Image (cartoon, coloured by chain):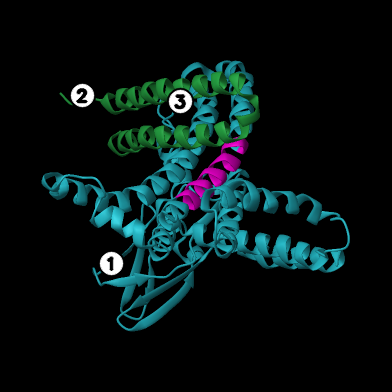
């Protein structure tokens, strides 16, 4: 019997990983901005860069899942 | 000026109208069979030789696009309407072309080079036209004495944002020579992301070949502008014990390629995923209709449409965000390659 839907589970796991990662980045950035509002522009840029890097890894997972399923 | 533009639009429309073609039957669903949205979604995501606008089967309307094929030292040029949506083969002398589920094949397995204007190429040419109209128009009105008006007052803040908030802080000294390239990159990705959101449009920035070329240019620009300390960090990482060198140097060399590779995947997957989600949400209506009948379709439709509307807003945000991130990371990589260590 062929097992189907494994790719979808993989995509879901990738989404969980990205969610945890981006959530932590966003939370820390908000804390930092609340402490030092004068640096919020710089913090925001770095937050987006870090979020993009996390998201990139998650999207590798999504692309592999897309190719498999 | 507006008169000329209107006439141009009318001319293009008149030129396209006779080319619109109609095609054969759809496969009817069997009793109790649930509608499978995957083929329609994949068809939308993929590139094709005709620009499908709307409708299925006999009622389907699409714009035929020119095929340009180089085979046996001869150039074959014809419109995709000759295929009658894959039902007929096109024979030119001893060369016979056929469409097999959207893929172009030569019946006698002859090798050929496909230089066709496909849907994505046509969409890219359209976006180039849009960019030229926007920016040539705006640049003509630009002057140092007067405050920007009209179109220019919309584009100037965007251009300044790219220059002052993306390029300048990340590249630093000597940023000026990279500004034209990064501006082009930003507006090309932005316009294509937004064009892709129009119904019946092509999925250009969600095509991995397009993002491959964009990130390949980034790879070239980054490495050509790399200075002594950039290459020094790759081939002679400072402060690394000699025993670790055989591990560190290959990692650094792989690192040259992973950065643009991630750029490629990020843009492709973000835009494709957005299109897939919107199409899936719309497909829910058809799945409900095939499973529960018309009442089910009417029940699901409002929910589905609301979700699609929500996703559309997110996608407009993503269109800007991905253009921003691509430009930001490209300028970051260039900045890392050109930074001066004292």
- Name the residue carrying label 3: A22
Chain B is which colour?
Answer: cyan
Residue numbers of the magenta segment:
B316-332
Occupied quadrant, residue B99: bottom left
**What residue do we see at 47% from left, 66% from top?**
B82
Asked whether residue B79 is drawn in magenta, I would say: no
Disc 3 with disc 1 on a shared chain: no
Secondary structure beneath disc 3?
helix
Report the magenta stretch's main SS: helix
**What residue do we see at 48% from left, 61% from top?**
B118
Subunit bearing disc 3:
A
- Name the residue carrying label 2: A3
Q: Which mark is residue B107?
A: 1
Q: State the separation of the CA atoms marked 3 and 1.
A: 51 Å
Q: Position of residue B144 (x, y in %)?
A: 83, 64
Secondary structure beneath disc 2?
loop
């Amino acid at each position: 019997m062929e097992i189907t839907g494994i790719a979808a589970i993989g995509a879901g796991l990738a989404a969980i990983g990205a969610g945890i990662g981006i959530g932590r980045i966003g939370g820390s950035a908000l804390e930092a901005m609340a402490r030092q509002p004068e640096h919020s522009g710089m913090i925001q840029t770095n937050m987006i860069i870090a979020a993009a890097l996390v998201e990139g890894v998650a999207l590798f997972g999504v692309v592999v899942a897309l190719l498999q399923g | 000026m507006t008169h000329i533009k209107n006439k141009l639009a009318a001319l293009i429309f008149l030129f396209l109208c006779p080319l619109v073609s109609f095609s054969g039957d759809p496969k009817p669903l069997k009793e109790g069979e649930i509608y499978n949205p995957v083929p329609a979604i994949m068809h939308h995501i993929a590139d094709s030789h005709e620009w499908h606008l709307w409708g299925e089967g006999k009622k389907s309307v699409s714009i035929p696009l020119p095929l340009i094929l180089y085979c046996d030292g001869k150039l074959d040029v014809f419109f995709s309407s000759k295929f009658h949506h894959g039902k007929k083969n096109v024979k030119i002398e001893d060369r016979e072309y056929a469409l097999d589920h959207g893929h172009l094949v030569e019946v006698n397995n002859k090798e050929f080079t496909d230089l066709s204007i496909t849907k994505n190429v046509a969409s890219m040419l359209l976006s180039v036209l849009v960019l030229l109209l926007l920016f040539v128009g705006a640049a003509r009105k630009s002057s140092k004495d007067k405050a920007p008006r009209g179109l220019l007052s919309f584009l100037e803040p965007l251009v300044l944002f790219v220059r002052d908030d993306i390029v300048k802080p990340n590249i630093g000294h000597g940023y000026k020579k990279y500004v034209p390239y990064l501006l082009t990159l930003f507006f090309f990705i932005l316009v294509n992301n937004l064009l892709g959101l129009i119904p019946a449009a092509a999925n250009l920035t969600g095509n991995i070949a397009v993002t491959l070329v964009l990130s390949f240019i980034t790879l070239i620009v980054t490495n050509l502008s790399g200075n002594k300390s950039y290459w020094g960090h790759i081939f002679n990482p400072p402060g690394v014990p000699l025993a670790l060198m055989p591990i560190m140097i290959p990692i650094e060399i792989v690192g040259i390629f992973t950065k643009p590779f991630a750029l490629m995947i990020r843009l492709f997957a973000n835009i494709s995923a957005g299109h897939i989600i919107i199409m899936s949400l719309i497909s829910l209506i058809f799945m409900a209709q095939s499973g529960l009948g018309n009442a089910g379709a009417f029940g699901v439709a409002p929910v589905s449409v609301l979700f699609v509307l929500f996703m559309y807003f997110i996608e407009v945000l993503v269109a800007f965000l991905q253009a921003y991130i691509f430009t930001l990371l490209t300028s970051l990589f260039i900045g890392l390659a050109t930074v001066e260590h004292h």
